[in-house]
Amino acid sequence: MYLCSEPPSSPQVVEEGADEEDEELSGAEDADLRASSGRGSLLTRRGITLRVLLKDGLVEPGDGILSIHYLGKTFVGDLLNDGKIRWVETGQIFNSPSAWATHCKRLVNPAKKSGCGWASVRYRGQKLVQYKTTWLHKYQPSADMSLISEGEDDEMGDDDEEEGKTTMLVEDKNKKSKPELHDIGLMQRRDRERIPVRYCTLGIEMDPHTLVELSAFSAINRFQPFNVAVSSNVLLLMDFHCHLTTSEVVGYLGGRWDTNTQLLTVLRAFPCRTRLADKDAAPAVEEEICQNLFMRGLSLVGWYHSHPRGPALPSLQDIDSQMDHQLRLQGSSNGFQPCLGIICGPYYHGNQGVASTITPFWVVPPPEQRPNDYGIPVAVEVTYVQDNFLTTDVLNEMMLLVEFYRSAPDLVQFSQMWSPNTSILDKIKASLSGHAPKDQAYAQILEHVYNQLRSTQ
């Protein structure tokens, strides 16, 4: 159930999120900046406000043309002539996208520290950050876009923080269709585009798609607060799912949490068989996963997603999403229950050999004296338990995935070459062999699955 505020008796101006990087300037500051700098001088990102976009005709005022989608809840706003935002539901007026986004997200998730306004608020379906970038391209083409833009390019399929991965169960998200794997050269060029940074180097104005290196618990003077055991069948199904498409995929993890032994056992993977832009399918997918968990006597214990051609390290958006998941899974009780995040990188050429890199991680909340900092992503030590056989559940799920992606525009071209001597299909086989059951009869079963993959092309 979502928290709701009573509508005020008269319009109320709300000023939240003033500490965020995307907070708008006041009217006087805006006017002074524009008068002093003009378009011939570099206008900082902070100076590009809704008033600037309105004045230069990139956006127009209107009723109901702004929206926020967060954790399954939709908020609708009016864009006023002075660049302020009026929330339709209550009539409250907000000075900036940051203030509105922060206010709305805290209604759904009181622990939310910031709103990521320009990346969260959409104008007629398009992110506001895209209009900011358009302004820069038009009026300041010489500006360093890597420093001024807000990372609106969805490189490697990272998903919007306010949609998709921020739900503990399936929520769909808007994103561009990814190109096919045309050639190895293209894949290698994209690999080089994402350079992970150390957590200690993070600043305020960071691209939300920035990848962050994982810390060790010992490096932050902590012990891992729980033990984790993961079934090899979970890894096999997850790795298979992540190999099928050039777009990012998401799935969920079922298992059990033993408070006495502090052991989290991951027994089953639940791939999300839905196109990530198809919001109509999300409730059915969510209900199916819930029913499957219930029938098997399992609890929701985590989630996974892919970085198809990038390092299997969390982005800043992934860190925020993992923190949201941890809070949602723990709920309102005082008891502790961990939520495991896993990132799978199947097609990154920085991987060793043909096997996917699989990275379990968790996020430690920032220090109390710096509550607005990002959480600290840490590597989770995991024990992998070898299954004796491939279950019928896993085999059926693999066949359903093949059928689901059969006609997808982002289906991987399995006959193309991963390396001079290895096709992509051979690469998939080799990667999955690392999770093979002890019973060698699985090889014949999987060969049937691979034949189905061949038939898709």
Image (spheres, grey):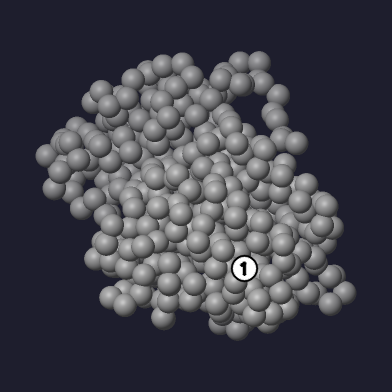
Q: Dividing the image into 4 quarters, which one contains the N terminus?
A: top right
**Residue 329 placement (x, y as % from top left):** 73, 55
Q: Is residue 335 above or below residue 390?
A: above
Residue 94 visible in image: yes
Q: Position of residue 92 (x, y in %)?
A: 57, 23
Residue located at (40% from left, 36% from top): 127
Q: Residue furthest right?
A: 260
Q: Is residue 299 left or right of residue 380?
A: right
Task: Please state if 26 lies on the left or on the right of 316 as rendered.
Answer: left
Residue 108 placement: quadrant: top right
Identify the residue shown where x is 78% and y is 74%: 263
Q: Is residue 157 visible?
A: no
* Category of crowding for the residue at label 1, using alpha-carbon neighbours closer than 10 angstroms: few (below 14), some (14–19), many (at least 20): few
Point 58% across, 32% down: residue: 280
- In the picture, measured across the screen, residue 328 lies left or right of residue 405, that is right
Label 1 secondary element: helix
Q: Nearer the viewer, residue 438 or 164?
A: 438
Pick the front one: 233 or 253: 233
Q: Which residue occupies the foreground of this view, 36 or 78?
A: 78
List x then y, in percent, for residue 21. Answer: 41, 48
Residue 400 percent coordinates (x, y): 60, 51
- To which quarter of the image does residue 282 belong? top right
Q: Which residue is mark 1?
A: 445
Q: Amino acid at mark 1?
A: Ile
